[in-house]
Amino acid sequence: QVQLVESGGGLVQAGDSLRISCAASGLPVNNYGMGWFRQAPGKEREFVAGISRNGGIFNANSVKGRFTISRDNAKNTVYLQMNSLKPEDTAVYYCAATNARIGVPGTAERYAYWGQGTQVTVSS
């Protein structure tokens, strides 16, 4: 049984940093493409960052230079380090896993497994 469990969300101020985690069980994170998505109220779920099976990193333009995805194979965990947070980063952040063999898809439909999400709120 596959489980993805996000943690580390919270309330921070603009300019602060936060690291959220995705602990996986039932699948090895280094054998799947792993992605972070976010969904703000009234908006569609959007791709934030991803790491492919071979370690390739992909970022949405809106977070380039501020967010960094990484994974710890020994802990079977994926992280999203978020720096210079802005109020527009406020959303529920979801971890997801895809069977894609090359790269990391930017569309939610390509991901087979999802976590329950963690809330990140950035105050101005």
Image (cartoon, helix red, strand yellow):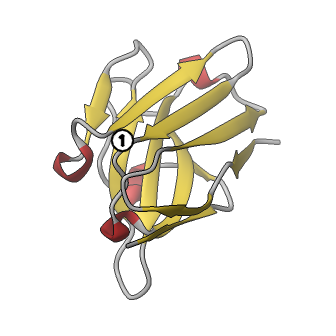
Q: Would residue 19 be found to the left or right of residue 111 on screen?
A: right
Asked if residue 87 is positioned above or below residue 82 in the image, the reply reads below
Asked if residue 122 is positioned above or below residue 71 in the image, the reply reads below
Kind of element beneath mark 1: strand
Q: Which residue is depicted at the point 34% across and 47% down?
A: 84
Q: Which residue is depicted at the point 48% across and 49% down?
A: 111
The picture places residue 55, in percent across and down from the top left corner, at 40, 15
Label 1 crowd bin: few (<14), some (14–19), many (20+), radius 10 Å? many
Towards the viewer: 4 or 83: 83
What amino acid is found at the position of numbered circle 1 in the picture? Ala
Q: Which residue is depicted at the point 37% across and 73% down?
A: 124
Towards the viewer: 113 or 50: 50
Q: Would residue 42 be found to the left or right of residue 76 on screen?
A: left
Judged from this view, the residue extending furthest toward the left is 61
Q: Quadrant of residue 40?
A: bottom left
The picture places residue 99, in percent across and down from the top left corner, at 49, 34
Q: Which residue is depicted at the point 70% across and 29% down?
A: 27
The picture places residue 98, in percent across and down from the top left corner, at 49, 39
Residue linked to disc 1:
49
Asked if residue 61 is positioned above or below residue 108 in the image, the reply reads above
Q: Would residue 58 be found to the left or right of residue 9 on screen?
A: left
Quadrant in which the N terminus appears = top right
Judged from this view, the residue extending furthest toward the bottom is 42
Q: Quadrant of residue 10?
A: bottom right
Q: Would residue 113 be found to the left or right of residue 109 on screen?
A: right
Towards the viewer: 30 or 119: 119
